[in-house]
Image (cartoon, coloured by chain):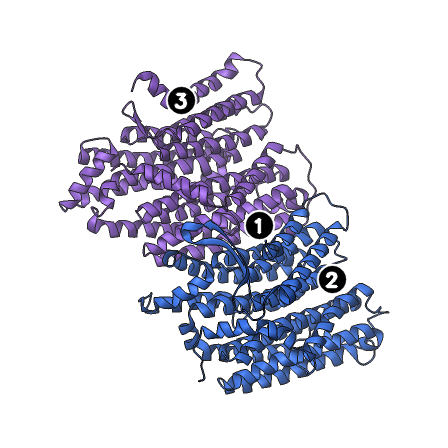
């Protein structure tokens, strides 16, 4: 086997994780992690902007090595526009997370080793062309994340870690059952081949009166919905995102939620287009409900971090609406939304982390006046907030606008309702900004120091990208256009 | 086959029998023998036996002296038993007995005698021989559990093992006598042919009663529901090395023998001859499998004692094995055999890790393990990997083994069993993490530092490396396939 660029993207973090077992000098752990993530970032950018042919919608850079041929399992890697964009996002987010963990003192070797393992899993999921391999990488994220939340988290880390684990594992078991059915019926796990094969099983009587493709759709959708997350199986998210240490929250919101979305658009929907189309209305309704529910719940939060966590639920609702509409602009908006939410939620968590490090708490009612004391944090925080609420000229706007325009024909009610959600989002984010950054400094907070050079860099990179994408969304849209067309071709259109 | 040839075929058994005698005499002859010497003799014999078993894997099949059967299935699992007994022996040698309390030599001897019993249990079609092996293994286990005479728990556990074990072997012997009456022979293959004839003529009870009796016998040995009561108590009362022998060598031997009995007895019927009896049989076995998995993993959730936790876990894992058995077909048996091999390797590592950690912390309670993973990262990380294999998480061999079982179950039309297994997997992960979490996520209490127990550490790390390496599952699958093929004589 001659490892191509995609294998390297998986092997590099793995090597980094293994290297943590070496007797390292203090500080070498983070050095390795940052180096590895920089290499991955470079490689992912090269693949996306130079290596790939944007006119081709299908898998590129394909690597295939047989693994268990009699079950049709192979080490099959491939990347298209969508997966490369998510790969760019995840390698960037991990780079920022390592940089933000610069001062981690509690057993840094274990900490960086576990984060690197998570990165292996995430990259693997985005690059797998084989569903079995996909599952293997999917599961790889589970245990390291449990230990990261449980070991380095805040006060309530214990229950948060358990909640995360139980919800995610229940989802994985549903995935496993789908995998068992496919193993028994299909004889291959190549996702492209399954896409041809599974819809043909519609004549199978299935089980309990539900046809086999519908079973597979239901199992896979539920298992990915836990990760996305979709109401009412979202309850692990606020706990995990709040209790995790800041860089891990950044990874959770910035990357792990995208795994759920990616699983849906790569596997759950295309494998059983019939079932997906039958459910599309419900999915859009769920999405709209997510948007409103997330915004509404965030509105009620006093804890800044909790508020950001709930806002993620709302933002992922847009993905669901946009994708269910099956129009080109809806899907493009959904894809862009994944990238932009990764940046904006990551930035918001970093801002909250910076505030907590200085004020000692993150309770909005007891904060204030940070804008004057920390101008750099204020400026970068404003970019994050405005991106998140969808202000034009920042990246959030094209994403949400495309979703709304693209879905109007198919689901006018859902779009109208989610406009309400956007309004609420703007309201609570601006409210949070007012409480934290304006007014006088409360007495409990002593002298605050503005962001240092490293912290500024960590926030400035995604902020710059948000502005760039707000002005020039075609930078990414062009890259995924062909892939989206190909994906859309698998489904007959909802609205003729 | 001449006597000399027979001896060559029976080399592993001969080595073990001789070695056991040497061990027994060792302390009598050498008055000043050091405690580790008998263990070293035992290990050498096990290594020798394993070497010849390894050779024998390639020798094909033979009936030796009319009683012993040498085939791939038997030899493969004999090898597995020998290796897992060697692991138990390493733990025993690393263990420190209280001063003045001897019993090392007895333990080594009993381990070897148990392995010898397992060898005969695994390598025969003859029911008398099978019963001898069953009893030989069982007797060794009763004594092993009770060998620490100075501990109250140990004596109690010994009595429990004896009472339940005697009951089970009695039931089994009764079943064997009924089978002899049915088939007019002690050879399972001939009984199988006769059984198919009896069933074809519509007599079901004559076959059902001995089947249920044999099921009860093996059920006790393998701790299936509702014959599982003894397992947690006995596991709790025995020392960790003995637990290793119970959970791996004894269990793997019993399970593999169960496969052989079913394959031999039902082989003539499996290709359609079982007719209308097939469905209820599958149903009974599947129901036992489901109940065993669920109860075992549910009960394991609440345990605070390390040994008891492992006991319930071993009950639950037996339920998973039974999924493959319940399918009563070649593919199911293959999956069950593969699961058994992976389970053995995983469990060797887990028990060795439990041994290491409990000796370091000085207690068997889960809460005493706090922080040990941080001070001993190699063992801690390896234990997490092994537990992932027990649960069935990738990238470990346990994942493939479990997945294969479930695929076969789905193909066999047991979709509901797949769901139950999924639920039980969630429970398994929860109790596995209840074991692993305090190792890393809680702070350490002061504890004395003892010896570094490097052979045990090597065992744990080696097993963990093994389950990760076997994520490339093809070798395990090949072994399982060959072994099941060698069971079909028609």
Label 1 vs 2, first from the N-terminus: 1
Outermost residue toward the left? B201
Q: The blue chain is which one?
A: A
Disc assigned to residue A100 = 2
Colour chain B is painted in: purple
Q: What SS does tag 1 mark? A: loop
Q: In this view, does B330 lie to the left or right of A330?
A: left
Q: Is residue B280 above or below residue B487?
A: below
Q: Which quarter of the rendered picture does the C terminus of chain B lie within?
A: top left
Residue A154 in view, yes or no: no
Q: Where's residue A477, x and y in %?
A: 61, 75
Residue in front for this viewpoint, B246 or B153: B246
Disc assigned to residue B7 = none
Residue in front for this viewpoint, B252 or A117: A117
Q: What SS does tag 2 mark? A: helix
Nearer the observer, disc 3 or disc 1? 1
- Quadrant of the image occupied by residue B341: top left
Q: Where's residue B145, x and y in %?
A: 46, 32
Q: Distance between the residues labelled 2 and 3?
A: 64 Å
Label 1 belongs to which residue? A2
């Amino acid at each position: 086997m001659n490892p191509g660029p995609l294998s390297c993207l998986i092997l590099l973090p793995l090597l980094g994780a293994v290297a943590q077992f070496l007797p390292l000098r203090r500080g070498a752990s983070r050095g390795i992690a940052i180096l590895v993530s920089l290499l991955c970032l470079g490689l992912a950018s090269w693949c996306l902007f130079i290596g790939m042919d944007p006119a081709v919608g299908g898998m590129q850079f394909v690597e295939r090595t047989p693994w268990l041929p009699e079950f049709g399992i192979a080490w099959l890697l491939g990347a298209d526009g969508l997966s490369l964009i998510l790969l760019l996002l995840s390698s960037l987010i991990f780079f920022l997370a390592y940089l933000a963990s610069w001062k981690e003192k509690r057993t840094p070797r274990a900490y960086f080793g576990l984060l690197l393992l998570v990165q292996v899993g995430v990259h693997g999921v985005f690059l797998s062309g084989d569903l079995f391999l996909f599952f293997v990488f999917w599961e790889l994220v589970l245990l390291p994340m449990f230990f990261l939340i449980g070991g380095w988290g805040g006060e309530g880390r214990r229950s948060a870690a358990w909640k995360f684990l139980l919800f995610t594992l229940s989802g994985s078991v549903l995935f496993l059952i789908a995998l068992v059915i496919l193993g028994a019926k299909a004889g291959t796990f190549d996702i492209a081949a399954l896409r041809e094969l599974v819809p043909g099983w519609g004549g199978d009587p299935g089980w309990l009166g539900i046809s086999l493709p519908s079973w597979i759709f239901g199992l896979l959708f539920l298992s990915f919905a836990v990760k996305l997350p979709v109401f009412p199986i979202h309850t692990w998210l606020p706990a995990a995102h709040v209790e995790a240490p800041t860089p891990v929250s950044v990874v959770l919101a910035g990357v792990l939620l995208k795994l759920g979305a990616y699983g849906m658009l790569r596997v759950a929907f295309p494998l059983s287009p019939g079932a997906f189309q039958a459910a599309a209305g419900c999915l859009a309704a769920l999405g709209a409900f997510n948007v409103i529910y997330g915004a509404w719940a965030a509105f009620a939060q006093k804890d800044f971090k909790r508020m950001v966590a709930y806002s993620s639920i709302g933002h992922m609702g847009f993905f669901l609406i946009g994708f269910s509409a099956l129009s080109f602009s809806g899907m493009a908006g959904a894809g862009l939304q994944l990238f932009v939410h990764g940046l904006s939620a990551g930035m918001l968590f970093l801002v909250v982390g910076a505030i907590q490090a200085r004020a000692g708490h993150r309770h909005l009612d007891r904060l204030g006046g940070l804008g004057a004391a920390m101008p750099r944090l204020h400026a970068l925080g404003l970019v994050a907030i405005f991106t998140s609420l969808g202000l034009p000229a920042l990246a959030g706007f094209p994403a949400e606008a495309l979703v709304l325009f693209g879905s109007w024909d198919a689901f006018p009610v859902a779009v109208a309702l989610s406009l309400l959600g956007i309004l609420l989002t703007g309201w609570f984010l601006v409210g949070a900004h007012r409480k934290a950054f304006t007014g006088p400094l409360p007495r409990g907070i002593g002298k605050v120091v503005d962001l240092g050079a490293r912290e500024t860099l960590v926030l400035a990179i995604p902020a710059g990208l948000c502005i760039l994408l707000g002005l020039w969304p075609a930078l990414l849209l062009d890259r995924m256009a062909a892939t989206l067309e190909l994906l859309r071709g698998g489904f007959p259109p909802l609205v003729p | 086959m001449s006597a000399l040839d027979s001896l060559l075929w029976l080399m592993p058994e001969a080595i073990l029998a001789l070695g056991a005698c040497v061990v027994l005499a060792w302390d009598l002859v050498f008055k000043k023998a050091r405690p580790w010497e008998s263990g070293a003799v035992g290990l050498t014999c096990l290594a020798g036996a394993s070497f010849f078993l390894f050779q024998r894997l390639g020798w094909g099949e033979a009936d030796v002296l009319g009683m012993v059967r040498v085939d791939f299935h038997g030899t493969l699992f004999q090898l597995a038993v020998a290796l897992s007994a060697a692991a138990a022996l390493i733990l025993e040698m690393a263990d420190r007995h209280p001063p003045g309390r001897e019993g090392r030599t007895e333990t080594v001897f009993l381990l070897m005698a148990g392995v010898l019993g397992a060898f005969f249990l695994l390598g025969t079609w003859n029911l008398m021989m099978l019963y001898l092996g069953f009893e030989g293994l069982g007797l060794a286990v009763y004594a092993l559990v009770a060998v620490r005479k100075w501990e109250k728990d140990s004596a109690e556990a010994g009595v429990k093992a004896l009472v339940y074990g005697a009951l089970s072997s009695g039931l089994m012997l009764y079943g064997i006598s009924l089978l002899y009456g049915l088939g007019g022979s002690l050879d399972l293959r001939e009984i199988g042919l006769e059984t198919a004839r009896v069933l074809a003529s519509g007599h079901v009870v004559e076959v059902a009663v001995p089947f249920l009796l044999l099921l009860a016998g093996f059920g006790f040995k393998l701790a299936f529901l509702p014959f599982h009561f003894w397992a947690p108590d006995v596991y709790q009362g025995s020392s960790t090395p003995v637990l290793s022998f119970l959970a791996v060598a004894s269990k793997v031997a019993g399970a593999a023998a169960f496969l052989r009995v079913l394959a031999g007895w039902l082989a003539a019927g499996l290709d359609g001859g079982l007719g209308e009896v097939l469905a209820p049989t599958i149903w009974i076995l599947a129901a036992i499998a489901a109940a065993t998995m669920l109860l075992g993993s549910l009960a394991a959730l609440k345990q605070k004692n390390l040994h008891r936790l492992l006991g319930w876990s071993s009950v639950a894992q037996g339920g998973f094995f039974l999924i493959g058995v319940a399918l009563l077909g070649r593919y199911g048996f293959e999956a069950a055999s593969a699961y058994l091999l992976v389970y053995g390797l995983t469990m060797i590592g887990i028990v060795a890790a439990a041994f290491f950690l409990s000796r370091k912390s000085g207690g068997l309670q889960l809460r005493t393990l706090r922080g040990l993973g941080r001070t001993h990262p190699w063992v801690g990380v390896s234990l997490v990997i092994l537990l992932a294999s027990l649960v069935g998480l990738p990238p470990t061999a346990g994942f493939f083994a479990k997945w294969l079982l479930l695929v076969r179950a789905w193909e066999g039309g047991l979709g509901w069993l797949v769901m139950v297994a999924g639920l039980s997997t969630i429970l398994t992960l929860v109790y596995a993490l209840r074991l692993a979490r305090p190792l890393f996520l809680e702070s350490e209490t002061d504890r004395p530092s003892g010896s570094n127990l490097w052979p045990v550490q090597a065992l744990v790390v080696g097993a963990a490396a093994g389950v990760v390496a076997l994520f490339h599952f093809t070798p395990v699958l090949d072994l399982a396939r060959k072994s099941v093929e060698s069971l079909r004589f028609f």
